Amino acid sequence: MTIKIPAVVATYLSADNAQDVEKICQCFTKDALVHEAGQQYRGRDAIRSWKQQTTAKYKYSVEPLETAVTERNIQLHARLTGNFPGSPAALHYTFVLANGQIQSLAID
């Protein structure tokens, strides 16, 4: 099955699977907000720190399963597999885009 997603989301997922923190950060607006595991990270520096900590602790891959795409919002259901307790895990990503970049991301 082919899943169609905006280029910036595809770039984010590819960079996340490669654990390329700098490329991940480039996907976000300067004042972007990420909400994950009960924590919030605002701005590229905070997002960089979050991803650096995550990639230092875990090796994982994200497999998109299905999406719902509107002009600015992308709902993505994915499987996260790696060396963490509870792997594999089903996650739901909500991306909000602005000017071709990710303005906010919620991961549940």
Image (spheres, rainbow, N blue to C red):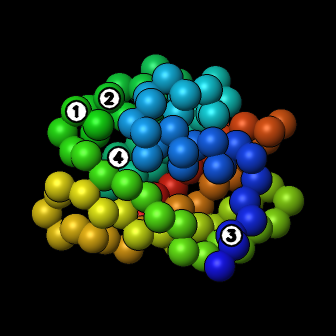
From the top left corner, tell me how far across and down residue 81 is, in percent: 30, 63
Label 2, label 1: how many angstroms apart (C-alpha)?
6 Å
Q: Nearer the viewer, mark 2 or mark 3?
A: 3
Label 2, label 4: how many angstroms apart (C-alpha)?
15 Å
- Local secondary structure at mark 3: loop
**Front position in the image: 37 or 25:** 25
Kind of residue at disc 1 = Ala
- Local secondary structure at mark 4: strand
Kind of residue at disc 4 = Gln
> Which mark is drawn over residue 52?
2
Q: Where does label 4 land, which residue?
A: 39
User: Would residue 99 appear left or right of 89 to someone viewing this image?
Assistant: right
Residue drawn 69% across the image and 72% down it:
2
Q: Where does label 1 land, which residue?
A: 56
Whether pointer 2 and pointer 4 mark residues with C-beta atoms closer than 8 Å, the reply is: no
**Front position in the image: 69 or 41:** 69
User: Would residue 37 appear left or right of 31 to someone viewing this image?
Assistant: left
